Image (spheres, coloured by chain):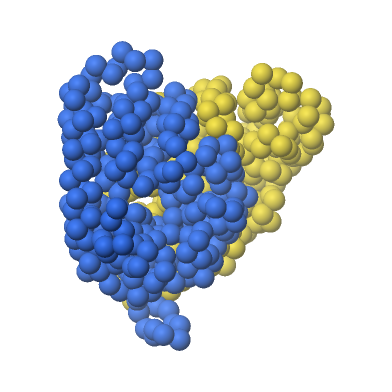
Chain colours: A yellow, B blue
Amino acid sequence: MGLDTDISKIPKHLLSESDPVFAFNKAIIDATKDLCVAYKINTAFYEALGTKGWQAMEKTVRYIDDEHFKIADAKRGDIGNTSAQYAKAFFETLPFDAITVSPYMGEDSVKPFLNQQGKWAIVLGLTSNKGAADFELQKIAYEDTSHRGNGFLYEKVLKTVSAWGTPDNLMFVIGATQADEFAHIRKITPGHFYLVPGVGAQGGSLKDISEKAMIKDCGLLVNVSRAIIYASTEKDFAGKARSAAEQYCTEMRSYLPKEFIS
Amino acid sequence: MGLDTDISKIPKHLLSESDPVFAFNKAIIDATKDLCVAYKINTAFYEALGTKGWQAMEKTVRYIDDEHFKIADAKRGDIGNTSAQYAKAFFETLPFDAITVSPYMGEDSVKPFLNQQGKWAIVLGLTSNKGAADFELQKIAYEDTSHRGNGFLYEKVLKTVSAWGTPDNLMFVIGATQADEFAHIRKITPGHFYLVPGVGAQGGSLKDISEKAMIKDCGLLVNVSRAIIYASTEKDFAGKARSAAEQYCTEMRSYLPKEFIS
């Protein structure tokens, strides 16, 4: 469940609360916690409100119980000593379990997110947006024992980054809109979980990604944000969000192996 | 001047202040404002302190006068609707003039930072760190009218991104440690300013970048952080920071065309 909470889109009656963003998140979390395994907080929407927004984010992540996986969707990444500060910000100062990381600056920018027990870096692989074509889907010249010639940049990223971590501290962002690449991506990174955005408002197919990239321990954390949290902008928003989440659950359940369904 | 203010590295006597990070920054700014054209705030060091850190960042950027260019070194970048929230965070909620942006996710992740009057996106080109070799310096296959065959990924980034903006809303991060590439980089992006980290603690040469990439309006914003702000960890820290800054100024002045020197 993606908490991309935009103060201009939440129900108007919440604006009289002392912290409208937290009030909204609390109601959404209460209404959906038995329907999802993880909450993903998109830091941009909180930073847009300045210090107050950062405070709402802090309250929200502390409100989520320890049964749920807590993802900071922050797309951070900088030289080593700076990435170490970001790791501190999200893994120590705040109790997130995982953070999304941009790979552009290479190994020393990613490693500080990989060396904390029980925490995950979720590195951008092939994203869900149109701009993925600009660099991620450009052909890059590289060689390894299994593959010679030109492959896409994102493949080079998946292969290179997966050598820096293990499925126990590293996942990848793979957009649900990139159906053509799913089977190939799973071949390159057979054991890693993927954080899958792009289902819902961005139009990606839950069926496609499930059929082509699910593994025996599932291996997919499918995120839906806007299509659930803004299902209604009226007082019934939490109930309507629950109904929308239930629909995604029902669909996801139909693709899961039997042993996952309780 | 880079304000990478790490609470574990500032003089101990400041820790009794109500906001030690802001107290440190205020003293550094007061001691150096006639010696630099810009302040660069590295968001990671503030986020590491949570809400209090975000507050210290907010106070710091508001304390810097309008004569100085204010850079959020934040390395942001996400799908369009999320990047728009980051642009709001740093250009509207906070009064920064520029923000560093990661290009990995392509056009829609960069564009929201380019469409605000009088604001700049500073996109990562070739960074100063060792990890630049992992992806930025990988050969990518591309063609354009002036260049056929394999060039580095960072060249593709410079060429592609420079078509999305102009020197009036777009700069690039070019690490001072990448001396071999400076002349070539200036050829690809003849009119853009570069934000140049890597001088000081990272060992890059001010002389090299000045000789090879300076243009008639200078075109270089050279950043030094640690080598200035941590020149002393005693009560004389502000004076020692000023002395360190003066040394960089004197050196930079020797490379500048005469018309720049007042």
Would residue B141 be found to the left or right of residue A200 on screen? left
Using the rendered view, name the quadrant where residue B244 is placed: top left
Q: Is residue B130 above or below residue B72?
A: below
Q: Quadrant of the N terminus of chain B?
A: top left
Residue A144 position, x and y percent, is 29, 70
Would residue B223 be found to the left or right of residue B159 on screen? left
A9 or B172, which is in the foreground? B172
Is residue B213 at all visible to an observer of this figure? yes
A257 or A151, which is in the foreground? A151
B161 or B78, which is in the foreground? B161
Residue B58 position, x and y percent, is 47, 31
Q: Is residue B107 above or below residue B53?
A: below
B180 or A234, which is in the foreground? B180
Residue A137 position, x and y percent, is 49, 68
Q: Is residue B224 above or below residue B48?
A: below
Q: Residue at x 71, y 44 (%)?
A: A227
Q: Residue at x 44, y 43 (%)?
A: B67
Is residue A160 at all visible to an observer of this figure? no
Which residue extends farthest top? B16
Would residue B218 be found to the left or right of residue B161 on screen? left
Residue A202 position, x and y percent, is 66, 54
Using the rendered view, name the quadrant where residue A56 is placed: top right
Q: Residue at x 44, y 37 (%)?
A: B65
Q: Residue at x 22, y 35 (%)?
A: B241
Would residue B121 be found to the left or right of residue B253 on screen? right
